[in-house]
């Protein structure tokens, strides 16, 4: 099953897999809710899951499907390779995580490997995940503060929205800059986006 909200991409992946006789696409869905419903009905051997979709996102859909079937084989297939997103996907129960710029043959080999019980990661994704163990992770409140800062809010406005003092916001931002090894607020936002704390589309 292919779960992705971009119809052209879905059909492109389906066309690639159709060229290989060992694969059969049983469903193409455009959001996480459909992915869960179709999984429950069809029980596909492999699910290719995008992260950013309307309704349930890929992480939540993965969690829901694994709740239905703890042995479900789900591969996150996405453009987001940041270590935070990789960790979230794997913690949700995904068996693999691969980027959409992967070569056709590599995608086929990857699916076969997951079907065979292995949990492979592409070199880039594995590298990002290894690097994450050497980095400090932002807390939930620090992410909230940084996201509001990314939207152009002052420390005072951030404090007002979160119900904390301006000094508390300043303390959180100081910690964020230290954890991300960032030069300033703009640099911190750039690093957070690259690592996958949230997607740039959520700021638009």
Image (cartoon, rainbow, N blue to C red):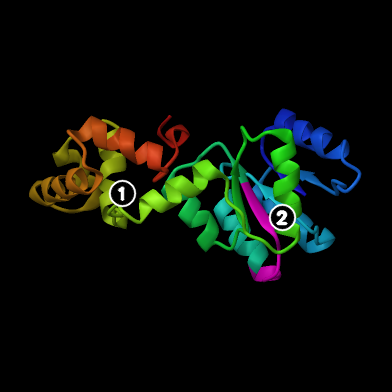
In reply to whether residue 201 is colored magenta, the answer given is: no
Identify the mark at residue 196; answer none if there is no mark.
Answer: none
- SS assignment at label 1: helix
Magenta residue span: 67-76
Identify the mark at residue 143; answer none if there is no mark.
Answer: 1
Give the side of residue 175 with respect to residue 147, left or right. Answer: left
Q: Measured along the vertical axis of the image, is residue 45 above or below residue 175? A: below
- SS assignment at label 2: helix
Q: Is residue 34 visible in the rendered structure shown here?
A: no
CA neighbours of label 2 inside 10 A, class few (<14), some (14 to 19), many (20+)? some
Q: Earlier in the sequence, mark 2 or mark 1?
A: 2
In reply to whether residue 72 is colored magenta, the answer given is: yes
- Out of 79 and 173, give the one closest to the viewer: 79
- Out of 184 and 131, give the one closest to the viewer: 131
Residue furthest to the left? 167
**Could you say where residue 31 lies in the image, as x and y percent from the top left?**
67, 45
Give the foreground label among 2 and 1: 2
**Could you say where residue 124 lies in the image, as x and y percent from the top left?**
50, 41
Q: Which residue is mark 2?
A: 113
Where is residue 146, by image quadrant? top left
**Could you say where residue 69 lies in the image, as x and y percent from the top left?**
71, 70
Q: Is residue 184 visible in the rendered structure shown here?
A: yes
For the C terminus, which image quadrant?
top left
Residue furthest to the right? 21
Q: Residue at x 88, y 48 (%)?
A: 22
Give the side of residue 104 with respect to residue 19, left or right. Answer: left
**Could you say where residue 98 lies in the image, as x and y percent from the top left?**
60, 44
Q: Are marks 2 and 1 in contact (CB under 8 Å)?
A: no
């Amino acid at each position: 099953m292919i779960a992705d909200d971009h119809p052209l991409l879905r059909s492109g992946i389906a066309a690639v897999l159709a060229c290989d006789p060992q694969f059969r696409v049983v469903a193409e869905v455009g959001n996480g809710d459909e992915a869960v419903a179709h999984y429950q009905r069809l029980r596909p051997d492999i699910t290719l899951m995008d992260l950013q979709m309307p309704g349930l996102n890929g992480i939540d859909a993965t969690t829901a499907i694994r709740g239905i079937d703890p042995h479900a084989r789900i591969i996150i297939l996405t453009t987001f390779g940041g270590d935070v997103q990789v960790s979230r996907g794997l913690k949700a129960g995904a068996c693999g995580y691969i980027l959409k710029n992967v070569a056709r043959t590599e995608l086929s080999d990857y699916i076969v490997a997951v079907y065979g019980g292995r949990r492979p990661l592409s070199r880039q994704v594995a590298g990002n995940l290894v690097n994450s163990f050497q980095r400090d992770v932002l807390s939930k409140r620090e992410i909230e503060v940084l996201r509001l800062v990314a939207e152009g809010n002052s420390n005072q406005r951030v404090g007002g929205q979160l119900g904390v003092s301006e000094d508390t916001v300043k303390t959180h931002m100081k910690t964020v800059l230290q954890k991300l090894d960032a030069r300033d607020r703009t640099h911190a936002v750039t690093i957070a986006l690259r690592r996958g704390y949230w997607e740039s589309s959520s700021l638009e």
